[in-house]
Structures are given as structure tokens and as C-alpha cells.
């Protein structure tokens, strides 16, 4: 199955810093999703994107659907300790099956 | 709020046992999914279902089967558990083309 390239693989940042991560695919997608997963829990949906060029925010999180439809970006502004977790991207071109990135592990140092 | 529940958070089974993992969603979603999650490999789709009694193979269906007798319930079955099936299993549901919601996961250990 298809796998998305997600980078960086891990990040260690100071509290208050901004964070950027991205996800790329060899295929065109119609939908991009961003999830956060905390240890021992299932992924929680953060942001859903449905149109190329779309920019959507959820509090301090902002995600963009790349205009080529082959990539997506997630930014977190002014990070706080509870932002710690693994962030996954997921893309779909059929609506039934989503393909997932391998995740970006975020550590926030107080 | 969408709620997806899984029958067990932790499960320990012996090699060769038949294992049932249950998933229930309360939002009348048409689509339901089973993934396994392993370090460095991300989430891999095992099976999905877009309607009652319908099922489609995902990327890694070998060694697994599924059952969907009711819209809200999707079961994953390991016919004869093996140690390489030790993993975190995640169930998800979605309405048509839209976002998937996940359950809390079942960490299965096969000894």
C-alpha cells in the first residue's frame, strides 16, 4: 500500500517555539487529515482539508492543503508542553481508504 | 461527539488461540476500518467495511478476517494468533468521504 513521506521524523523544541511539519505523496489526494496521538491512545482528529490551497486553523494549529494536491503542511504556533505527541498526516483520493504517514514525534521542553 | 469504543485496551493471548477484537461506533457511520500500528511502520489498513455484511481487504489482510453484522459493530478476528500479530490495533469509523474517527486502541500481545 501507499505510504506518505512525513517529515521531520522527530522534533525537540523549546516551549513557546513554533513548529512546522509536512507530508508528501506521489499521488494526488482529494482529502488531507491531520491527527495527534498521545501514548497509549488512538489518534485524535485535529484538522480536515478538502480543497487544494485550503488553509484551516484549529486554535494554535494551522494546516494547509498544498496546491499540487500532493502535499500538506501543519504548523503549531507558540508550543506548550501538552502539544507533546505523535502527529500523523493521512490522505485519500477515494474517500474510503486513507493512507497514513509514519508520524512526527514532537517533544516540547519546558 | 463521535464515540468509537473498542472492547479491550490490553489483551494477552497464546499462539494458536482465536482472538476477537470488537469495535462499536455510535454515530451511524457507514464506513468502519481496522488498522494495526507498529513502530516505524505507521498505520496499516487490515480491512474495511462500507456497509453491513460488506468488507474489503486492505493492505495487510493475511491472517485476519472481519465481520460486520450490524452497522455499528465491526469485529476483527485472528483465526490462529501468531507472535507477529503482536501489535496495537485501531478501529475507526467515518461517514462516506469524510474524516475518520479512531477508538482508543487495543494493545494485543501474543505469547
Image (cartoon, coloured by chain):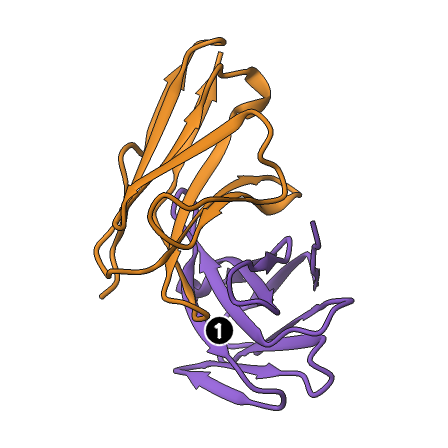
Chain colours: A purple, B orange
Quadrant where the N terminus of chain B is found in the figure:
bottom left
Tell me if B29 is positioned left or right of A74 in this view: left
Q: Is residue A110 visible?
A: no
Q: Is residue B67 above or below residue A77?
A: above
Q: Is residue B86 above or below residue A16?
A: above
Tell me if A94 is positioned left or right of A66 in this view: left
* Chain under disc 1: A
Could you say whether the residue bearing mark 1 is in a helix, strand or loop?
Answer: loop
Q: Is residue B111 above or below residue B104?
A: above
Tell me if A44 is positioned left or right of A34 in this view: left
Give the labeled residue for mark 1: A79
Disc 1 crowd, CA 10 A, few/some/many (<14, 14-19, 20+): many
Q: Is residue B91 visible?
A: yes
State which quadrant residue B3 falls in.
bottom left
x, y (%) of residue A15?
A: 50, 70
Residue B75 versus residue A58: which sits nearer the camera? Answer: B75
x, y (%) of residue B49?
A: 43, 49
Q: How many marks?
A: 1
Residue B88 versus residue A3: which sits nearer the camera? Answer: A3
Tell me if A59 is positioned left or right of A98 in this view: left
Q: Is residue A109 above or below residue B55?
A: below
Residue A86 versus residue B50: which sits nearer the camera? Answer: B50
Residue A97 versus residue B35: which sits nearer the camera? Answer: A97
- The residue sitting at 26% across, 62% down in the picture is B2
- The residue sitting at 63% across, 58% down in the picture is A101
x, y (%) of residue B46?
A: 54, 40
x, y (%) of residue A109?
A: 52, 61
In the picture as drawn, the residue positioned furthest to the right comes out as A26
- The residue sitting at 43% across, 64% down in the picture is A81
Amino acid at each position: 500500500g501507499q505510504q506518505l513521506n512525513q517529515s521531520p521524523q522527530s522534533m525537540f523544541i523549546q516551549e513557546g517555539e513554533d513548529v512546522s511539519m509536512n507530508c508528501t505523496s506521489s499521488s494526488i489526494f482529494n482529502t488531507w487529515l491531520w491527527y495527534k496521538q498521545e501514548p497509549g491512545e488512538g489518534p485524535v482528529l485535529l484538522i480536515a482539508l478538502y480543497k487544494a490551497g485550503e488553509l484551516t486553523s484549529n486554535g494554535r494549529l494551522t494546516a494547509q492543503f498544498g496546491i499540487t494536491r500532493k502535499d500538506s503542511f501543519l504548523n503549531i504556533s507558540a508550543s506548550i508542553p501538552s502539544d507533546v505527541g505523535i502527529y500523523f498526516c493521512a490522505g485519500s483520493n477515494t474517500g474510503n481508504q486513507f493512507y497514513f504517514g509514519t508520524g512526527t514525534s514532537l517533544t516540547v521542553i519546558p | 461527539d463521535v464515540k468509537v469504543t473498542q472492547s479491550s485496551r490490553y489483551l494477552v493471548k497464546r499462539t494458536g488461540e482465536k482472538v476477537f477484537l470488537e469495535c462499536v461506533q455510535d454515530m451511524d457511520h457507514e464506513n468502519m476500518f481496522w488498522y494495526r500500528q507498529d513502530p516505524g511502520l505507521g498505520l496499516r489498513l487490515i480491512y474495511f467495511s462500507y456497509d453491513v455484511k460488506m468488507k474489503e481487504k486492505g493492505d495487510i489482510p493475511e491472517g485476519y478476517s472481519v465481520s460486520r453484522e450490524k452497522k455499528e459493530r465491526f469485529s476483527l478476528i485472528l483465526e490462529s494468533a501468531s507472535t507477529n500479530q503482536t501489535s496495537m490495533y485501531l478501529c475507526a469509523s467515518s461517514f462516506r468521504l469524510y474524516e475518520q474517527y479512531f477508538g482508543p486502541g487495543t494493545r494485543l500481545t501474543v505469547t
